[in-house]
Image: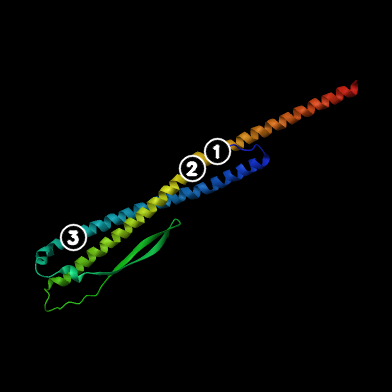
Amino acid sequence: MAKIKLSKNELKREKDSLKRYLRYLPTLILKKQQLQAEIRRIETKLEETRAESVSGKQALELWIGLFGTSVDIGSYVQVAEVVSGTSNIAGIDIPVFERVRFQDLPWDLFLTPLWVDRAVEVLQRLVALEMEMRVLQEQCDIIAAELRVTSQRINLFEKVKIPEARENIRRIRIFMGDQEVAAVVRGKISKNKIVKGGVA
């Protein structure tokens, strides 16, 4: 514990600090609750997206036998851009997945098998799901890091700063009370000396 000055100015400063900590702590607690709720929401969305991706891959297995032909299906699915925006959650900016834009690659409808159209749709959906999962994971990582910092601040306030300020206020008040008692006692002693000196 740092050494404090036992003065009225220090008492005021400690009271102001305590008031500030007590005013800021509920805000931090609310932020922590918002971040925890958002992480749960994102994790749920991530699980749903994973489940959709798994079912898409299972549907894709129906096409695997056809992929054994000379058609390179990967050449028909190329990402041009992953479009994402930002959102603000409890004061922090996180990326938000919007969509994947694929390059428009034409193919000869007479030379390619009929199943290629459907296979391209399935692959594009799987790629979009993969990109969405990456953005969701990034959201989760950013919010988890902010949650750690917020939890540390709450612990600092609850376990260190607020008790420390209260203890400092208590010590200063005790010291100032002792000083007031000592001043009264000195005054009475002086008065008694003056009274005795005046009677003699």
User: Residue tagged by mark 2?
Assistant: 156
Between the C-alphas of marks 1 and 2, the distance is 10 Å
- Residue pictured at 66% horizontal, 32% vertical: 175
Which dot, 1 or 3, sits closer to the camera? 1
Q: Mark 1 vs mark 2: which is more N-terminal?
A: 2
- For residue 200, side relative to residue 33 (left or right): right
User: Residue tagged by mark 3?
Assistant: 57
* Farthest-out residue, top: 200
Q: Mark 2 vs mark 3: which is more N-terminal?
A: 3
- Is there a contact, CB below 8 Å, between mark 1 and mark 2? no
- For residue 147, side relative to residue 63 (left or right): right
Specify whether residue 161 is in view: yes
* Farthest-out residue, front: 3
Locate the N terminus and report the quarter of the image it occupies. top right
Between the C-alphas of marks 1 and 3, the distance is 58 Å
Residue type at the position of mark 1: Glu
Residue situated in front as seen by the camera: 36 or 179: 179
Rendered location of residue 150, percent (x, y): 45, 48
Q: Mark 1 vs mark 3: which is more N-terminal?
A: 3
Rendered location of residue 60, percent (x, y): 16, 63
Specify whether residue 37 is in view: no
Q: Secondary structure at mark 3?
A: helix
- Residue pictured at 32% horizontal, 56% vertical: 137
Circle 3 residues within 10 Å: few <14, some 14–19, many ≥20: some
- For residue 152, side relative to residue 120 (left or right): right
User: Residue tagged by mark 1?
Assistant: 164
Residue type at the position of mark 2: Leu
Residue 68 sits above or below residue 108 on the image = above
The image quadrant of residue 122 is bottom left
Q: Secondary structure at mark 2?
A: helix
- Residue pictured at 32% horizontal, 53% vertical: 43
Which dot, 2 or 3, sits closer to the camera? 2
